[in-house]
Amino acid sequence: MADEERAKRKREHLELAMKQTDGDNGFDEMELIRPALPETKLSQVDLSTSFLAHELKAPILIEAMTGGTDEAAKINEALSRIARDLGIGLALGSCSIVEKSPESLSSFTIARKVNRKGLLFANCSPTTPVRAIRKTVKGMRADALQIHLNAVQEMAMAEGDRDLTWLEHIGNIRMSCPCPIIVKEVGFGLDRRSVQRLVEIGVDTFDIGGKGGTNFAQIELERGGNDNHLSTLADLGLTTAESLMDLRGIKGINIIASGGIRTPLDTLKCLVGGANLVGMAGSVLKVLKQEGEEGCRAYLARFIEELRVLLCLFGCQRINDAKKVEYVLHGKLREFAEQRSVRHG
Ligand SMILES: Cc1cc2nc3c(=O)[nH]c(=O)nc-3n(C[C@H](O)[C@H](O)[C@H](O)COP(=O)(O)O)c2cc1C
């Protein structure tokens, strides 16, 4: 694809993501049981955590969004300063563009210039040439590489890929990438079987990217994509809550929960459901665009403080204690979790 077209697509994604309305992330049907006797002190609640051997001040990740254009460089620079100041993680958008436009590399490496020690992820598609990946990972000194699975988006895009055979590519990237890899979805959720197939080839870190937030089928429809299929494509996938339930019991994996996370309570529910880290893209982008860098930093700082209050109220002194919070599932989420656990034993 021509560089100009790719850059235009990136601009359109940013614009259209801003206009998206909230979807259903499934967490309304997960009810946490709050202990009336929490036995915690707010001053002693510690939100710090370690992810891929990196220390974070809170279990939050600003998710992959952009790179490759001048506007993207400005966004990445601002997000990187925010992540540095708050001690949280940051993933950048896909580096596929670096193959054809080597000058676009600076829109990615800027993040590392600003945030020299923070947790930083590069991002690519399964078919991004290894050369572009190595160049970006090295330039960013990335701590990990996210490989995104975006099958629904590809089908929805008029110019999208129709070849969805990715497993071998992922294996090759894993073997040649100088840092750990994370496989993620982009808003349609990860299912148990796909994760197990990836575990078999040595992947152990996953980012759910579930349904309930940014919806790329809808975005592609608005860009004038492949209208014949789109009415159904926008409804496909697992919500973030369903995806989290589907991955329960898979041993030895790290989970980032993302997709439609809008509140500290959603975040706590992700931690209770087994996530190690919680990611947000669309909601952060909206605040950044509407309230600027200061506003976005203040918003995330408040978000983290509220998470601290919630942990205290639910009797958790540390992030890991969240896994002991009791919960019940209602409605569709309960049915989903029951049927999937019967089927998987
Ligand atoms: C403007 C925009 C651009 C995105 N670009 C990428 C990308 O390049 N690579 C990727 O893996 N995910 C990308 N995503 C998906 C997010 O990383 C995330 O998985 C998804 O938006 C779900 O999170 P959300 O509901 O909090 O937005 C993008 C999201 C947005 C809003």
Image (cartoon, rainbow, N blue to C red):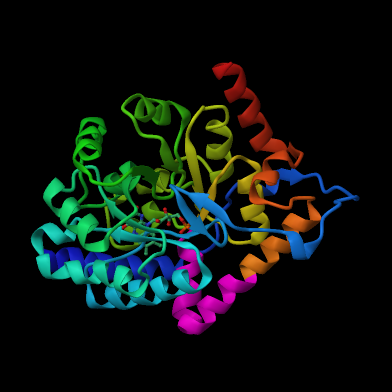
Along the line of sight, the residue nearer the viewer: 15 or 315: 315
- The residue shown at (34%, 62%) is 222
Q: Is residue 297 magenta?
A: yes
Q: Is residue 161 visible?
A: yes
Check the image and report above or below for 164 versus 214.
above
| Magenta stretch bounds | 280-302
Find the residue positioned furthest to the right.
37
- The residue shown at (39%, 45%) is 185
Residue 216 percent coordinates (x, y): 38, 54
- The residue shown at (82%, 48%) is 34
Residue 52 percent coordinates (x, y): 43, 47
Q: Main secondary structure of the magenta part?
A: helix
Along the line of sight, the residue nearer the viewer: 101 or 221: 101
Residue 41 percent coordinates (x, y): 81, 60
Q: Is residue 163 visible?
A: no
Quick check: 214 left or right of 160? Answer: right
Position of the N terminus, as image quadrant, is bottom left
